[in-house]
Image (spheres, coloured by chain):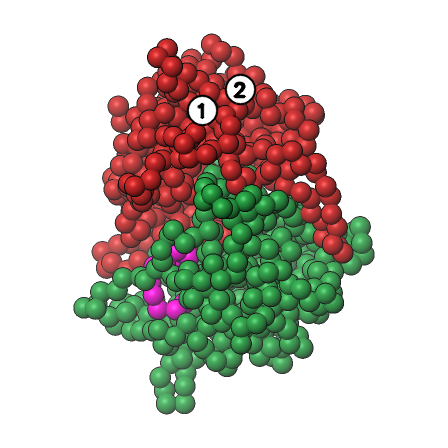
Chain colours: A green, B red
Amino acid sequence: MDKNKKNDKTSISHAKDEKAQPTELRQDLVTGDWVVIATGRARRPEDFASSKREVIEENPEKPCFFCYPEETEQEKDSLIYRLADGDWSLRVFPNKFPAFARGRSVKHKEEGPYFSMDGAGYHELVVTRDHRKQIAEMNILEVAEIVDAYQERYIELMNKKSVNFIEIFHNHGKEAGASISHPHSQIMAIPVISPYVQLELDGAERYHKNNKHCVYCTMIEWEAEHKKRIVFENDDFIAFCPFSSRAAFEVWVLPKKHKPYFERTADKEKLALAEALQVAVRKIYAALEDPAYNFYIHTAPCDGKDYPHFHWHIEILPRTANWAGFELSTGIEISTIQPEVAAEYLRKID
Amino acid sequence: MDKNKKNDKTSISHAKDEKAQPTELRQDLVTGDWVVIATGRARRPEDFASSKREVIEENPEKPCFFCYPEETEQEKDSLIYRLADGDWSLRVFPNKFPAFARGRSVKHKEEGPYFSMDGAGYHELVVTRDHRKQIAEMNILEVAEIVDAYQERYIELMNKKSVNFIEIFHNHGKEAGASISHPHSQIMAIPVISPYVQLELDGAERYHKNNKHCVYCTMIEWEAEHKKRIVFENDDFIAFCPFSSRAAFEVWVLPKKHKPYFERTADKEKLALAEALQVAVRKIYAALEDPAYNFYIHTAPCDGKDYPHFHWHIEILPRTANWAGFELSTGIEISTIQPEVAAEYLRKID
């Protein structure tokens, strides 16, 4: 990917015929955090195309770890889906070098004023069969199989000792942190609650207390009615560019009905979920010409408590921005296209 | 920069002679957030060298905007420091395409459940004379002049209408978001308080309530006594790798005495601040062989309230990591070297 094409938000631009445009601070309805929508360089949606991800180098002499898990000495599968002919279509196995390691008890340690604990938990890889076929190119049944695997592993891991939160995510492209080009997702089952999800839990709780309504349902109802930020919807799921998008072409996918827990997704809703996720990813793929992106599931913790006011969802974050000093320091992201304009562009893509 | 050398934290590694090492979850004493220290790939400090930043392309036909601000039609200076011979040594001028635009009133807007406001404020550039000389190569007096400019502009901007918070930051290298190679810092004076600083304000307040002591002073005292994470100290300032470092070789610089407000730094402390900042940056420069980095000041808001329990500081974040799906989703960063090991390595650098 040509980094010059990246959306360098706090950079300096100087072409004589450009004019500074007003910028806007938008508040995240859930967390209260802020983003800046700065369209000052008059970027049109087309300007974000050619955001093609960087290629991950592969050694043609060596077999792919994920095409040949046994031969390359991967850990034993925790899940495998097979085709009628006996070949596998999807498998899940532990990461050999996990960020959270199996089988450890969570030992707490203190060093003077500081607190730490063992990185106990599970770190698994969800690998699909085809070395090249990315989610944007899969059919809905193939994506539904991935969703099935996410759910099946979630349910297995959620009741493990030391697991209080499970993060399922997908890194696509080198800029998004992928180091192996073979498409895969990751599951991390960890002893602490994600700080970002905690902010959402707190925000959802606060909103419900003040408004007697789910904050995510409020957004869904507004977006479904006004349609200007909608990217796609079917009977059970809706995809839209959030009002306070943190990066150009960010898309969220949410169940239309109020549901706190991803793992309770009913079988009959799973095709609708696979469709919404696949269509959203495919539209981003087409609009930005195969960009790097991350997506991840935000669902309620599995720490034994109830979270009735949370509403699980998927956030898709194309790597259209390089967060620099301002974003890292403040947590206020600067996005250079209005989500309404991005959504309109994505809607038009078949 | 060779991206392969980057510290790809959630990636998959497979060399046969490697063994998975235990990982550790460390809690940020101020905010309560978590980081993972995953030394699983047995990375030594030397392994992070050759993290040289990517070169920003320059057009040799065109004059540099920052070498020739008048000729390239930059905005009028808001501050200029001159040498005895009449040439300038440092100047501050508004960004032509600001993320926050001058002279606007903060108009609040509502769209259904959502809330936004004008991006009113100030966005300035702090430019030093030499096109090539980065902070790691400057002498202490040159860095003191930058600190002077930061303070002078802070004091001017803090009382402006609509300004409630000021962020001063420095992007060095393309990966850190710099788009012009000529060294410069940026100042953004904005109407809202940085969400990240708000977390620190809340944490400092909470810690003080429970312990009757500043949380940053607690860290400084512990680090000064035990010395294992210290990088540098002089009479007035201390630099150390934080216990819960979010990236390899992260360094914080803090005044040793309890001080909430950067802008009240006394003249006699400014050389000590310049020294601590310059030494920390120079050691990172040497250890990682001229990496990309960001640094930024976290100081109390200028919204008219008092923040007696906050303790201003500078955070230096080398771009040793590429935050991927897990970090973006959870806010839990994975760092692949213990801060104690990084600090020991930095201490040894002259």
Residue B133 visible in the shown view: yes
Chain ID, mark 2: B
**Badge 2 amino acid:** Glu
User: The N terminus of chain A is located in which quarter?
Assistant: bottom left
Q: Earlier in the sequence, mark 2 or mark 1?
A: 1
Q: Which of label 2 and label 1 is nearer to you?
A: 1
**Badge 1 amino acid:** Arg
Q: Dot 2 lies on which element?
A: helix
For the point 18% across and 68% down, the residue is A61
For the point 51% across and 49% down, the residue is A41
C-alpha separation, residue under disc 2 versus residue under disc 1:
12 Å
Check disc 2 and report the residue beneath it: B152
For the point 47% across and 13% down, the residue is B269
Chain ID, mark 1: B
Expressed as whole percent of the image width and height from the top left, the position of residue B181 reads: 35, 37
Q: Give the quadrant of residue B157.
A: top right
Write down the region rendered in magenta: A174-187
Left or right side of B224 for B152? right
Check disc 1 and report the residue beneath it: B91
For the point 57% across and 61% down, the residue is A342
Query: Which residue is at the far left?
Result: A61
Left or right side of B72 for A30? right
